[in-house]
Structures are given as C-alpha cells and as structure tokens.
Image: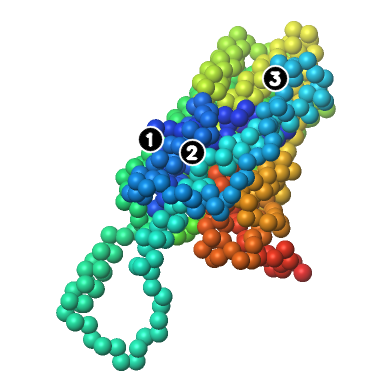
Amino acid sequence: MMASPRQHNPGMSRSPPSFLELSPQQDWGVMSTRGQSLPGLIRRYSLSEGAATRDTDDMEQVAGAQADQASGSSIERPHRRGSILIGDTTSPFRWSGYYTPPVQLKSLRKPVREYYERMNYLVSRYSYVDRLLDSSIARDLLEDYERHWAKNQGQLHTITEEQSAAPLQTSSEESAAINNQAGYNHLTERTPLLVSPDNEVETGGFGHDHASDARRIVMTAIYINLTANCILLAAKIVVTVMTSSVSVLASLVDAALDFLSTAIIWSTTRITTRRDRFRYPVGRQRLEPVGVLIFSVVMITSFFQVALVSLQRLIGDDHSLIELTLPAIIIMVSTVAIKGLCWIWCRRVNDSNVQALAQDAMTDIVFNIFSIIFPLVGTFANLWFLDPTGGLFLSFYVIFNWASTAKEHIAHLTGAAASLDDRSVFLYLVMRFAACIRWVQNLEAYHSGDRLNVEVDVVLDETTTLHDSHDIGESLQYMLENVTNVDRAFVHLDYTEYNLPTHVDHTR
C-alpha cells in the first residue's frame, strides 16, 4: 500500500472537473457571510463534480432571483451595489482557444507533449477563475453585506465612558435587561454574530451531509485496506518462515509498514475531523503531512536494514539457492490478487485520500510481483545472487522514493513558496476581481502543510470609504479561499502604492 509515495506533477494536465463546478443548482440558498451560510454554499460547489457547466447568464439569473426573494423586496434596483463596486471585469481571453485536445497530444514528442500538458493545466485553472468571477457570488456577497448593514446599523452602538453617577434602572428596564441576558444563554461558539433566519433554514446541514458522506467513504476505504493488510501480513509471515528469501523479507517489511501506514492515516483522519476551535483555531490539517513525514523516517530506516541484510548475503559465504515452494508461491500470488481488488475498488472513489490508497495498492502489486520474480528466476536459472540483489534493489527503490517524499513534506511544513503556476492563477484572480483595485502591490503564496496560504496587498482609491473597502477586501478573500488548494487567504488594503513591509522580519 504505502511502499511508494504518491508523486505530484503540477505540470501534468488535469481535467477541469477536478475544480469547483459553478453550475446552477435548484436548491441554491441565498448567501450570508455573517450568517455562516457561505461555507455551505462553497461546499455545494465543491461537491457538485460531474455536473454540466451552464451559461453564466443563467447562473446570475438564478442567484439574482434568490437574492431578491431573500431581501423581501419585489422592486428591482436599477444599480446593484455589487455591480458598481466590482465594475466590468469581463475577461479579455477565451481560454478554450488555447486548449490542446488529448488526441493531438498523443502524436507529439514527449518534451513537446509535456509543455502542452502544462498549458492545458493552466488553461483549466484560468477557465475556472473566469467561471468563478463571472458568476454572481462576489456581487451577492457585497449585496449581502449591504443588506445586513442596513438591517443592523440601528442595533450597533459605540462604547461610551461610564457615567460617574449612573441613574438606577426602572423596573421595566431591569426586566428588559434580564430578558436580554436570558436570550444569550442558548448561544454557543458556533452561533453567528448576526443571524439571518431566512438563510439559516435553507442552507442548514446541506454541506454537512455531503461532508459526512465523504468522510464515511474515506473511513470505509481505510477499514478495507486495514483488513487486507492484516491478511497479507499474516500470509507473508508464513512465507518468510517457509523460505529464507531476502526479497520475500523485503515484502514482509513492506506489509508490516503498510499496516502502520494505514493506522497513521486512520488516526490523523479522525483527529483532523474533530475540530477544537479553542485549542486549534485553524484546525489540525497539518497533522497529515507530519504523520507522513514520521512514517517516511520509519520506512527509510526499516528498508535500510533490509538492504544491509541483502549486502551481507552478497558478500557472505552462503551461496545456497532459495527455493519457493508451491504453497509459498500460491500465498504470494494471492497477495497480489487481494491488492488488485483493493486497487479496483479504491480507484472508483472520487476522493483524494482514497485515490492515494489506490495508487499505493498499485505500487504494492508491482512490489509483490518482483518479490516473486527474483527468487523464482534465481532458482530456475541457478543464480544464487538474484534473490539478495532483488532485495537490495527493492530496498533502494523504497528508500529513494520515501526520501523524496520526506523532502517534499519538510518543504511544505516549513513554508515553501507555491509554484509559479499557482501564483500566476492567484494573481490573475486578483487582477480580474474588481475594477476599483488600482494595483496589486504584493502577492505571497506559501505552503502551510499540504495546502496554501495566500497574502495579497492591493491598492484602492484613497477616496474609497471604509465600508466599501472592507466589503471588497473580504469578498476577495472568500474568492481566493474558494480555489481548491487554498487553506486561508489574507487581503491587505492600501491607499497608496508605497507601503512598509507587511510583517516584521525577526531574523535581522
């Protein structure tokens, strides 16, 4: 399962359905950022894979109609605030003209094909940004801010200094204060500051149900792989006892560590899904790369010991042939068959964690096949050194692959910069977001575990009010966080192109 880590190649082409779909759904709810309905809406987009892409005008008609219904007004306003602030930001590019069909890619040489595969990947990312910004999400966010501000501005009061001799409350005032205090007793940490009852009913639980289904699928895949690993571990222990093959020993170590890897994935998945907003305000998603890093060290150390055993066999005086009996061969072939069934099932589940299990199962299939081939060929060809050579080869294969994985996760955990492709996509989104953004002063994208943090400094007109600046900045933040590989986004607003560094450099 975990004998070979999953390799990431950002330059390879990826199909657009891997990004969030923006197809209009009949059960869309009106967005309320302060009423906590926006996360549910974004989850709806992320879980609507496979839906056909509709026309953007239809999308805006659906969302616009719902916004008017939620506001309770049947009079259409001639100028929506969102459209005024964002302005006309139509994309000047038609990215579909730059996309190369896969049929044409097959006829190209490998270097040229890799170049166009990377271009297809960028085209799909830019097209996704266009669909995101051409939808009504950002404009409806601004309308939502305006609607709640108008509704609640009379309820918000500034804090004034306490009078030295404050008059005593009347009985009616005391009863009102008691009633207000009683109304706060049901509040929890998840209660929104400003609640929108209309939106609360429409969006409650929709994204949670889909997220629960996805977690159930992941946990089912983990349990299936855990059961398979237990069976394979017991079978390989029997084969190792029956023979003294180093290649089979390497396969046994791999099976034992597969059991450990499944346990690590299971434990980190359960821990990260249990949110504690007081102890871990931004979640514990970085536990996953930490777990992989720890497992990488264990994997490298274990197979280093297997490599030492192989070298001792090669330089030792014992040149006896390793013979695999028929029961041992049957057991090893059965392990390949079980891993093959796990791979067939896991590859049908459209989830990144389950896809990782599927790729690891395929790697184990290849690993176990070579564990059988090396001693068998050595026996039939009367070549004693093939078995320890095979064990040495498999050990180096695992060591180099997991060393590469450890290096990658160390870079991600220490805040390595995002790729140029990712930064270009973020820059394109910020440049296209609103016409009132005069300059993009700075953009930083860096890893915080497996996902990215994005910080952007934008310059608005100095006459822009705090009201408008806040709504533009927070709407841009939500748009950036709507990109699939972004964990958190931070938008800094300036009124001039000159600004001091955003953060203090403590290394000087």
Q: Residue at x 67, y 60 (%)?
A: 459
- Quadrant including the N terminus: top right
Q: Which is nearer the eye, 389 or 174? A: 174
Q: Is residue 394 left or right of residue 465?
A: right
Q: Residues within 10 Å of mark 2 (few under 14, many from 20)?
A: some
N-term mark: 3 or 2: 2
Kind of residue at disc 2: Glu
Please determine whether, in this image, residue 77 is positioned above or below residue 243.
Answer: below
Say which mark, if any, is on residue 102. Answer: 3
C-alpha span from label 3 to label 2: 32 Å
Type of amino acid under label 1 = Asp
The location of residue 251, given as percent across then percent down, is: 64, 25
Distance from the alpha carbon under mark 1 to that under mark 2 = 14 Å
Per the image, the residue denoted by label 2 is 60
| Image quarter of residue 501 | bottom right
The residue identified by callout 1 is: 27
Residue farthest to the left? 171
Left or right relative to 310: residue 261: left
Foreground: disc 3 or disc 1: 1
Q: Looking at the image, is mark 1 or mark 2 nearer the viewer?
A: 2
